[in-house]
Each structure stands twice: as structure tokens, then as C-alpha cells.
Amino acid sequence: MLFFCNNKLNQFYYFFMSEKLSEAHTILFWFEDKQEEQRLIDYFSLQGYHCTSYSNKEQLDQLLAKPHHNISLIVIDINIKETDAILACNEIKSHKRVGIPFVIIVSDKEEEFTQVTALDLGADDYIIKPVKPQIFLKRVKAILSRKAPALQPAKKLNGAFAIDTERHVILIDNNPYELPRKEFELMNLFYSVPNKIFTREEIAITLWKEERIAKQRTIDVHIRNIRRILGKNLIKTVKGFGYGLNKVAAII
């Protein structure tokens, strides 16, 4: 069970001792158990964060339709009934714009497969219940600190394509795009040796440390998502062999 203080003295202390980092961030919570959700909202509100909540998928769709929003982080309970939490996470992280919120999945499912799937499909963290509020707060701060106030100098391949490894942003014709973690790592791998076609086994071992991933559809799913976000011509496919950066597309 989450612990939080109700007396005015502690509220005063927590509010004024919260770091400046929290003042700029709004956290959205989406839980099936609204009592559990409210305990989290109460705790993070005491730390100085702005908190709000969702109750259905329609509200998420409305957020994603907006060109601008003030949500920095979405915390999703894996037990939401209206939709699959992991697929909802992937939908959030696959949008073609900068300013995509970070996503944390909170879950009572400890299976390695579920955790790996969630992280592969874009979750920035996966926290197993029962939630320990102070540890949760530390992990939230660590994630939010990754969002720098401005773009850092990017490594440039040419005038049209660049990768900013500080901010985890892909730049195409100076337009920034955010990708889920594994997809960004995949693009960075291709960028590391622009003229190379990587075999599926090389990709699997480099990014997942497991060769068996090469025989699954995981890599194909990530390639398809990257093409949906960045365009179909950026990644080259060599049938029966692997993938690499398309040099022709990169210099357009």
C-alpha cells in the first residue's frame, strides 16, 4: 500500500522541498483501480507535480490528436480493461511528432516476456507492484531528467539526416522525430556504419543480447514502426539477409 502524509505540516514540507524539476511536469495516470490511482496522484501532488487522470481510451485518442499538450509522463496500469496497456503505450510512442510523453507501465505481472515486450514496444520503465513511492519517485525523476530543454549538438551524416544521441531524437531535414527506445537504438546501430547491411543475427545480438530474437518477428515489427514514423525509404532491406541505412534516402 502506498504511504503518503495527510497533515498540513508534512504537506508544507514536501511541497517546498520538492525539486524545481517537478514544477514543469504534468503526469497523467490511467488506472483501472481508481483508489490506487488516487493514492499515486496524492503522493506526487505532494512532491509538487501537476497530476491528472484518464478513465477511457477516447481521452487518450483526444490527447494524441492534439499538436501540442503539456503531458510529460503517462503512467499506465497494465490492468486497464478497455484496451491493452502495452499496445496503448506503443500507440503513444509511435506518433510522428516531438514532445511524445514518456510512458511507465505499472504491473502485477512479473513474467520476463511481458516486461521485455513492454520495453520493446516503447515503455520507458516497467514497475512491478506493490509500488514503493520513494523508489517510484526516483525513477520518475530519472526519466523526466532525460528531456533536455534544447537540442544538443547532433552527429551529422549529411544535411538531411542526423541523430541526436543526447536527446534521443532523429532529425530529418531539421525536423525532429522521437522513437521508442529500441527503435532509436536500431536507427543508431544503422547510423554507426552507414554503408553496412546488418544481418538479423547481428541486430539481435547487439540490441537484445539474444540470437533467438533473429528468428522471431520482433525486428520486423520495429522496422515497420520506424518506416511508419520516418518514411519507407530510410531503411534498406536486403531480402534474406538483413537491414541497413539507405544511402540514397539519407542524402535526399
Image (cartoon, helix red, strand yellow):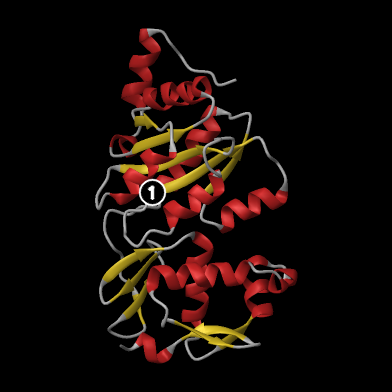
In the picture, the quarter occupied by the C terminus is bottom left
Residue at x 40%, y 7% (from the top left corner):
7
Of 172 and 193, nearer the camera is 172
**Image spot of residue 110 (x, y percent):** 70, 41
Q: Is residue 122 above or below residue 63?
A: below
Mark 1: secondary structure: loop
Which amino acid type corresponds to the residue marked 1 in the rendered image? Answer: Pro
The quarter of the picture where residue 70 lies is top left
The quarter of the picture where residue 10 lies is top left
**Image spot of residue 136 (x, y percent):** 52, 34
Q: Is residue 101 above or below residue 55?
A: below
Mark 1 — residue?
101
Residue at x 40%, y 42% (from the top left corner):
73
Query: On the rendered structure, is 184 left or right of 218?
Result: left
**Image spot of residue 102 (x, y percent):** 42, 48
Of 192 and 107, nearer the camera is 107
Residue at x 30%, y 50% (from the top left corner):
65
Query: On the rendered structure, is 1 left or right of 34?
Result: right
